RNA sequence: GGUUCCGUAGCUCAGUUGGAUAGAGCAACAGCCUUCUAAGCUGUGGGUCGAGCGUUCGAGUCGCUCCGGAAUCACCA
């Protein structure tokens, strides 16, 4: 079982390329020259700290001069002034500078930004890198459901994170394999099966008009309920609670079922296949609604055998130890971990066995460079053990296994508990978000003139956009609170806000085509942009580096927050200036181009999050 | 108890390799639609960045010690 809820363990810190602005590069060269000319010495890159100028100061980029004072042997202020003077005199792109304490604020000529916009516009898949033949292959495992219950809110975070990570890694130039491990065997499945056999009267999901996963889940719940009753009865009759749990008739039956299943009993296996089939049909609907996909799905019922063979082989090779009772262990005390069980004394597989097998099969299938497991932080220890065990068994590629450990989703009242019925069902939640989006659209009088099908599609996009953004904007490693009332908010820092900004831009572009057809294609690099326009261009300029950073940090939240910043900045520009109403043709074309590009980047950013961008809303 | 993670405004969250006066949204209050979509824009109030010590020219960010919360330490998954 992979994703009930959930810490961080071995997130590999990929060394980050410094964000290389085109302008930052130019400045670096200029500053190096300045230092050489002023103080006859070379300056290392690590001393050149260039950052964006904060809003409250005049300028675009800022050089922090404290680190340079040992070279200049002057005060930070004096150092800043001398470099600033040199840059202003030697670089055409530098239109001015000011110095505040040890900070040299450099102003870039507005015309430079217009040229920058023009060159961004000329790149067709701006921000995305096509995987080259030699690119890294990354396997990403996410979702990983049990087949005894429908998906819930915890799975939603998992699926959204996994899917978004897969797109981000692809956009950053890796080859990505999306994969899933279905935990389709074990005692929990047998519980549903027993309950269905005893209480189901041969009914099927369609008889009750239910999704298959919900149908099967109901029997699992029924099992647990009756089982609890039985244990209570036994305790009342004098058993200890422990004995009662072991000896309740239902539990005995489930155990028998598991043994029969493992022995390949025909009837049991066909019942198992039928019920799992129902569940898969249900899951498919949910996955489709969420918009997530997989390239290859693995089943624990198939991989656990490979795992067992691996363990036995490794035992022969002397990497493992067998205890008197026949159980097989790996001793990880040298790695400051415990001894860990790999096979039970009766020879059956445990959770770890299956994962060992799955990893080896996957490596043989894809020869991945990295394998990312999107699994809750409650399983940190498990994945630590998994990676080390595989390395001990002689698989050096296990160094590429990476546990993407994300935090739990909690409700305002606390943790979700199935006992107390506070589990938020995935299908219900999706339906609710769509319904809210529909009601909101109605209330605001949007979507007039659209067909019913179009309206439904747009409302679905908005509802899901709200849900996905709400979850993805939070730093994955942190536990998050899911507040139902807040999640359906469509104002402020939300998915619909970004979608709305995109739809507005599309609307302007359409109108532009009708009136001033296609003129934004013209080159407009000789426009002098205003401050708001420059702010937007700066953000657009950040996008490619941001995609790389999000891939390296494995953080959809970076993309989400960037999209919000860009949308907000654009809305300010949109509010303050007219695009189509601008009389100066050059300026109008420039603004159209700025808008068009913002739309494109927003659409790509949303794409990376798995959020659709509606043309109208 | 061991290990790991988290703690920033009333609430939900941002905060770049350590940089300037710590930012958004929600909630509250006050404004802006004859003009490209008001799901928008503008303004006001709101903080001992859990506490302390240290490193540094400079700490929300790095180190140590506490305090508070969470996860994990199964012949469960």
Image: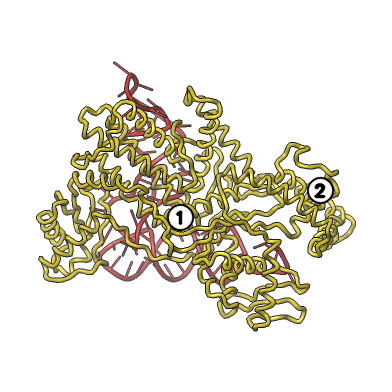
The one of A421 and B46 positioned closer to us in this rendering: A421
Do the residues at discs 2 and 1 belong to one chain? Answer: yes
Q: Which mark is residue A47?
A: none
The one of A123 and A592 positioned closer to us in this rendering: A123
Q: Colour of chain A?
A: yellow
Q: Quadrant of residue A327?
A: bottom right
The one of A408 and A298 positioned closer to us in this rendering: A298
Q: Which residue is mark 1?
A: A170
Q: Position of residue A12 (x, y in %)?
A: 46, 66
How was this image coloured? by chain
SS at badge 1: helix
User: How many angstroms separate mark 2 from mark 1 (CA)?
Assistant: 43 Å
Tag 2 near tag 1, CB within 8 Å: no
In the picture shown, does residue B44 fall above or below A298? above
Q: Position of residue A55 (x, y in %)?
A: 27, 46
Q: Position of residue A517 (x, y in %)?
A: 30, 30
SS at badge 2: helix
Residue at 31% in and 26% down: A515
Task: Evaluate whether residue A256 shows in this view.
Answer: yes
Which of the two marks, 2 or 1, is nearer to us in this view?
Answer: 1
Find the residue positioned furthest to the bottom. Answer: A318
Find the residue positioned furthest to the right. Answer: A237
Crowd tier of the residue under label 1, counting other residues whose Cα lies within 10 Å: few below 14, some 14–19, many 20 or above:
many
Letter of the chain shown red in the rendering: B
Nearer the N terminus, badge 2 or badge 1? 1
Task: Evaluate whether residue A2 shows in this view.
Answer: no
User: In the displayed structure, does residue B55 sit left or right of residue A209?
Assistant: left
Parent chain of label 2 = A
Crowd tier of the residue under label 2, counting other residues whose Cα lies within 10 Å: few below 14, some 14–19, many 20 or above:
many
Q: Which residue is mark 2?
A: A196
Q: Quadrant of residue A580?
A: top left
Residue at 42% in and 46% down: A605
């Amino acid at each position: 079982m992979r994703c009930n809820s959930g810490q961080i363990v071995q997130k590999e810190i990929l060394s980050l390329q410094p964000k290389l602005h085109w302008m930052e590069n130019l400045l670096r060269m200029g500053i190096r020259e300045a230092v050489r000319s002023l103080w006859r010495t070379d300056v290392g890159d690590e001393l050149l700290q260039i950052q964006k100028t904060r809003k409250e100061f005049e300028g675009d980029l800022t050089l922090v001069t404290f680190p340079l004072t040992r070279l200049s042997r002057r005060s930070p202020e004096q150092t800043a002034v001398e470099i600033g003077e040199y840059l202003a005199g030697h670089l055409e792109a530098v239109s001015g500078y000011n110095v505040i304490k040890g900070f040299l604020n450099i102003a870039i000529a507005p015309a430079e930004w217009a040229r920058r916009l023009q060159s961004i516009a000329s790149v067709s898949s701006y921000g995305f890198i096509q995987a080259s033949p030699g690119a890294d292959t990354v396997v990403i495992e996410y979702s990983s459901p049990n087949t005894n219950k429908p998906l819930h809110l915890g799975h939603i975070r998992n699926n959204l994170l996994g899917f978004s990570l897969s797109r981000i890694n692809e956009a950053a130039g890796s080859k990505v394999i999306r994969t899933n491990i279905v935990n389709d065997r074990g005692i929990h499945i047998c519980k549903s099966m027993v309950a269905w056999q005893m209480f189901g009267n041969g009914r099927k999901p369609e008889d009750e008009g239910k999704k298959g996963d919900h149908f099967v889940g109901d029997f699992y719940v029924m099992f647990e309920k009756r089982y609890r009753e039985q244990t209570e009865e036994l305790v009342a009759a004098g058993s200890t609670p422990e004995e009662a749990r072991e000896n309740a008739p239902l539990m005995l039956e489930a155990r028998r079922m598991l043994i029969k299943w493992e022995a390949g009993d025909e009837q049991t296996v066909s019942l198992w296949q039928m019920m799992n089939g129902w569940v898969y049909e249900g899951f498919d609907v949910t996955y489709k609604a969420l918009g997530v996909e997989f390239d290859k799905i693995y089943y624990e019922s198939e991989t656990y055998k490979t795992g067992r063979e691996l363990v036995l082989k490794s035992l022969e090779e002397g990497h493992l130890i067998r205890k008197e009772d026949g159980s097989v262990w790996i001793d990880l005390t040298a790695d400051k971990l415990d001894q860990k069980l790999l096979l039970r004394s009766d020879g059956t597989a445990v959770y770890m066995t299956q994962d060992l097998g799955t990893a080896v099969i996957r490596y043989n299938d894809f020869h991945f460079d990295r394998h990312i497991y999107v699994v809750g932080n409650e399983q940190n220890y498990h994945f630590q053990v998994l990676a080390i065990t595989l390395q001990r068994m002689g698989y050096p590629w296990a160094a590429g296994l990476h546990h993407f450990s994300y935090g739990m989703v909690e409700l305002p009242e606390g943790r979700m508990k199935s006992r107390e019925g506070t589990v938020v069902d995935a299908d219900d939640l999706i339906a609710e978000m769509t319904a809210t989006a529909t009601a909101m659209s109605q209330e605001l009088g949007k979507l007039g003139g659209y067909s019913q099908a179009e309206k439904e599609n747009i409302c679905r996009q908005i509802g899901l956009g709200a849900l996905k953004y709400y979850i993805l904007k939070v730093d994955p490693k942190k536990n998050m609170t899911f507040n139902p009332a807040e999640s359906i908010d469509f104002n402020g820092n939300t998915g619909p806000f970004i979608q709305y900004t995109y739809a507005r831009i599309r609307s302007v572009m359409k109108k532009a085509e009708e009136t001033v057809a296609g003129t934004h294609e013209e080159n407009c690099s000789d426009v002098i942009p205003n401050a708001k326009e420059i702010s937007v261009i700066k953000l657009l300029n950040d996008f490619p580096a941001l995609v790389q950073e999000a891939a390296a940090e494995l953080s959809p939240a970076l993309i989400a927050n960037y999209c919000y910043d860009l949308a907000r900045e654009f809305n300010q520009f949109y509010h303050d200036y007219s695009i189509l109403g601008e009389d100066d043709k050059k300026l109008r074309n420039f603004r159209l181009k700025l808008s068009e590009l913002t739309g494109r980047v927003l659409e790509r950013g949303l794409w990376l999050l798995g959020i659709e961008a509606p043309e109208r809303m």
